[in-house]
Amino acid sequence: MATFLWNDIVFGPIISRRVGRSLGVNLLPTEAKVCTFDCVYCECGGLKRGAKAHPLPTLEQVCSAIEGRFAAIAAEGRGVDSISFTGNGEPTLHPDFPAIIDITLAARGRYFPTAVVSVFSNATRLDRPEVVAALKKVDNPILKIDCALENMAAVMNRPAPGYSVERTVQLMEAFGGNFVLQTMLVRGSVIDNTTPEALEAWYAAVRRLRPREIMLYSVSRDTPVAGIEKVAASDLAAAAAPLVAEGFNVQINA
Ligand code: SF4
């Protein structure tokens, strides 16, 4: 059940088949996950509830890391195809997230003008207009709904109190479909969001939101909770088939 944490603010470039040479940006502490979810499959491990709070990097530290690392890689003549906000938790939790997006887009323009900027978010902070405005500035706001059944989402994502899938779908409608929906499918003794009931509820949410792309994937690393099983690529494709038949752009990341 080995899980891992990113140990820097800017990491990479990592070579990815899907997005090429990719730099990651981690706005969370390097010592612990900080997130509004505690997904049973999270590759960062479980939340350490009650543990001492780890500070987030300051705006100054993030700016320095972005400027320093981008400049160093560019000076080596190495290109970057994508810049992705991911890391040890939920990036929109950073209080300076909107400013950091502006700084990143400016640095992208100076150093890697063709690089695509993505933010992987669990969509729990869409009730803040400044977060939505910042997410709309990047090329790929990648927003998570794993399960559209409230009870199942509670088991799978273990959200902080107050989370509601229905409310999140309503807030996602502000994107007018101009976002990427990310959905993790898993099976096992703890959770199975591939059941017909779960998939039908998810299809209904997708039809409401009409995202320009759907990223469907399953676990690829160890999980903090035992009994979580990977869903095979062929089963991911079968789950996506009704949406593909309706014209949705579904990418299977197995
Ligand atoms: S939303 Fe992402 S970072 Fe947060 S617990 Fe889930 S998988 Fe981990």
Image (spheres, rainbow, N blue to C red):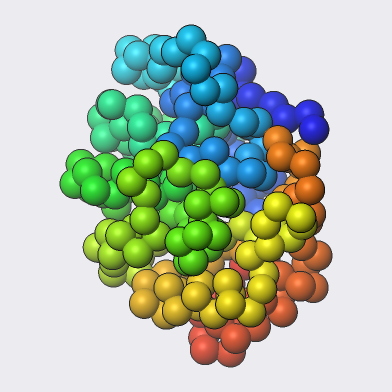
- Which quarter of the figure has residue 253? bottom right
Expressed as whole percent of the image width and height from the top left, the position of residue 159 reads 46, 43
Q: Nearer the viewer, residue 222 or 160?
A: 160
Q: Please report the residue visible at 58 percent of the width from the left and 77 percent of the height from the top.
A: 197
Which quarter of the rendering shows the C terminus? bottom right
Expressed as whole percent of the image width and height from the top left, the position of residue 26 reads 50, 27
Expressed as whole percent of the image width and height from the top left, the position of residue 3 reads 72, 30
Q: Nearer the viewer, residue 72 or 88?
A: 88
Q: Nearer the viewer, residue 122 or 77?
A: 122
Q: Please report the residue visible at 29 percent of the width from the left and 49 percent of the height from the top.
A: 126
- Which quarter of the figure has residue 146? bottom right
Q: Residue furthest left?
A: 129
Left or right: 220 as drawn, with respect to 212: right
Q: Please report the residue visible at 56 percent of the width from the left and 28 percent of the height from the top.
A: 47
Left or right: 213 as drawn, with respect to 102: right
Q: Where is 237 relative to 125, above or below?
A: below
Which quarter of the rendering shows the N terminus? top right
Q: Nearer the viewer, residue 229 or 28?
A: 229
Left or right: 243 as drawn, with respect to 15: left
Q: Where is 134 relative to 230, above or below?
A: above
Q: Please report the residue visible at 46 percent of the width from the left and 33 percent of the height from the top.
A: 35
Would residue 73 be visible to someone looking at this image?
no
Expressed as whole percent of the image width and height from the top left, the position of residue 50 reads 49, 17
